[in-house]
Image: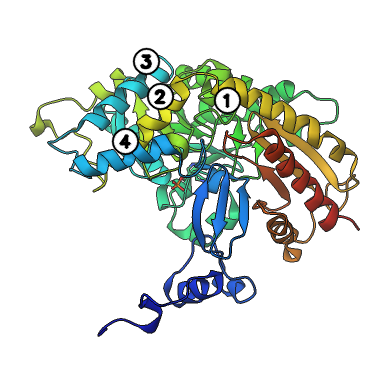
């Protein structure tokens, strides 16, 4: 066959080794030092079922991290797959400028119904970082349209993460991702995170959050005139090693943002759709942000899609004669893609049946009980949990909490050990965590937690 390499002929053998070898000829992987693949080639996945992923050699892996926190109801879910397939035969895509389609309309209606009251406007984008860019630009642009030209800066929390595009990276604070690009980034203000791991001995997470809020209040007071918005990940700083904080911080922040005339952006991209025990994490603080960013679980882990929800007052600042030049012209080609919206609607239908949050409560209680004995391990310094997110922090020294030298890559060693036990885990620094799909059986849940324990015991046994 002219133009076809040998590897592409129908007779080519498809197994882990052949596919990985072909992959490494051309595919440049995300979040990866490609040279690592000389030792450990990527694992080609052939199919998924429920919480399991199956490779080409017949091995399987329990997806303990929901494929980067996207999957909610399992892989190849019959109803979500059918909804996408049906939509594909009707309309795969149409631009959302000047046109619309039923899945985008229905999804906006449903999101507005589910979100904190008053978030009545839905702007679509196509991934999490893009949603953060939209929220930042919309906030800045709102103040421009209102004549507050000086309000052009953003305030973020230390240890936060909001994505990899330049605007999103600028409001993030994880050095691993940010440092190299620092010269390219916006100048943002950073308040200390209320992360409960940092609390003093005997201090409650609430008291700690209140104490940390003093610095936030001071920054708001000092910079209100130049601040457009504060951006936070409600309750859990996921990429920042699953650090968690008390909801009172969000209440204090909402109140202060109102007092100082600064927007509040809630990045629920990782924590939305039930991860923290409520549909949205903001609910636990009873607050309504000015912008709420959604992605990841929005489509059940099927397709890239994101949405930024906001309210009428902000919408009104852009609504004018065309000649007034106030419109929000931000656009992505795949904005509100119908296939992705269909996946999202089928995902929301799973929640609408009821019982999801309740069964998650049982699963998270089971995880908590099973992990508890690990607290006695000499290298375990913290076990924390928020709903369906369970994290174990380990350290070289328990008293000082000094981390292991990062060059030892103990997290990577745990990843390899977990794979041997048919579990996919991907530690972040010195934190091994589970954020599984919601469809685990009790046995699968136990396998996941037992594997975390086994990994810590094997890699921090000395
Ligand atoms: N915000 C948060 C809180 C995230 O966890 C992530 C992704 N890990 C993003 C934004 C970026 O989303 P995406 O990877 O889809 O760009």
Distance Cα–Cα, label 4 vs label 1: 39 Å
As drawn, 102 above or below 18: above
The relative height of residue 363 versus residue 1 in the rendered view (above or below) is above
Q: Residue at x 59, y 50 (%)?
A: 174
Q: Which label lies toward us, 4 or 1?
A: 4
Q: Position of residue 255 (x, y in %)?
A: 52, 16
Could you classify mark 3 by the number of other residues whose Cα lies within 10 Å: few (under 14), some (14-19), or many (20 or more)? some
The answer to which of 49 and 278 lies nearer the viewer is 49
Q: Earlier in the sequence, mark 4 or mark 3?
A: 3
Q: Quadrant of the N terminus?
A: bottom left
- N-terminal label among 1 and 3: 3
Residue occupying image coordinates x 14% and y 36%:
99
Q: Earlier in the sequence, mark 2 or mark 1?
A: 1
> Dot 4 corresponds to which residue?
341
Q: Which residue is mark 2?
A: 290
Query: Residue 208 sits in which quadrant?
Result: top right
The picture quadrant where one finds residue 369 is top right
Return the x and y of residue 11 as percentages of the image width and height: 40, 77
Residue on which disc 3 sits: 118
């Amino acid at each position: 066959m002219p133009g076809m390499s040998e590897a592409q002929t129908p007779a080519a053998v498809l197994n882990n080794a052949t596919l990985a070898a072909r992959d490494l000829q051309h595919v440049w992987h995300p979040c990866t030092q490609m040279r690592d693949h000389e030792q450990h080639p990527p694992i080609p996945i052939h199919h998924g079922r429920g919480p399991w992923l199956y490779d080409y050699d017949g091995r399987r892996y329990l997806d303990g991290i929901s494929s980067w926190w996207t999957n909610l109801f399992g892989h190849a879910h019959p109803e979500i797959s059918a909804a996408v397939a049906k939509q594909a035969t009707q309309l795969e895509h149409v631009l959302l400028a000047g046109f619309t389609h039923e899945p985008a309309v229905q999804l906006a209606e449903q999101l507005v119904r589910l979100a904190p009251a008053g978030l009545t406007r839905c702007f679509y984008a196509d991934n999490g970082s893009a949603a953060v860019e939209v929220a930042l630009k919309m906030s800045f642009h709102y103040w421009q349209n209102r004549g507050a030209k000086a309000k052009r800066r953003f305030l973020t929390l230390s240890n936060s993460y909001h994505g990899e595009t330049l605007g999103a990276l600028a409001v993030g604070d994880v050095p691993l991702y940010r440092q190299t690009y620092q010269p390219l980034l916006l100048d943002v203000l950073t308040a200390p995170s209320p992360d409960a791991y940092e609390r003093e001995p005997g201090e409650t997470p609430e008291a700690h959050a209140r104490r940390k809020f003093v610095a936030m209040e001071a920054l708001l007071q000092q910079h209100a005139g130049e601040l457009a918005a504060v951006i936070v990940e409600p309750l859990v700083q996921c990429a920042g090693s699953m650090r968690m904080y008390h909801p009172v911080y969000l209440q204090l922040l909402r109140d202060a943002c109102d007092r100082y005339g600064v927007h509040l952006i809630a990045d629920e991209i990782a924590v939305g759709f039930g991860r923290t025990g409520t549909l949205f994490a903001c609910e636990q603080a009873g607050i309504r942000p000015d912008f709420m960013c959604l992605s990841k679980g929005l489509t059940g882990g099927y397709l890239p899609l994101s949405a930024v929800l906001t309210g009428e007052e902000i919408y009104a600042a852009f609504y004018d004669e065309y000649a007034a030049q106030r419109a929000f012209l931000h656009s992505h080609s795949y904005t509100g893609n119908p296939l992705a919206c269909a996946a999202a609607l089928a995902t929301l239908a799973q929640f609408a049946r009821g019982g999801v949050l309740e069964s998650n409560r049982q699963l998270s209680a089971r995880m908590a009980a099973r992990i508890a004995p690990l607290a006695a391990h000499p290298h375990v310094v913290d076990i924390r949990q928020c709903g369906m997110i369970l994290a174990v922090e380990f350290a070289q020294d328990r008293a000082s909490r000094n981390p292991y030298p990062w060059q030892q890559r103990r997290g990577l060693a745990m990843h390899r050990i977990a794979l041997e036990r048919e579990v996919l885990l991907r530690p972040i620094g010195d934190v091994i965590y589970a954020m599984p799909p919601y469809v685990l059986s009790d046995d699968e849940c136990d396998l996941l937690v037992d594997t975390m324990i086994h990994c810590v015991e094997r890699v921090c046994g000395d």
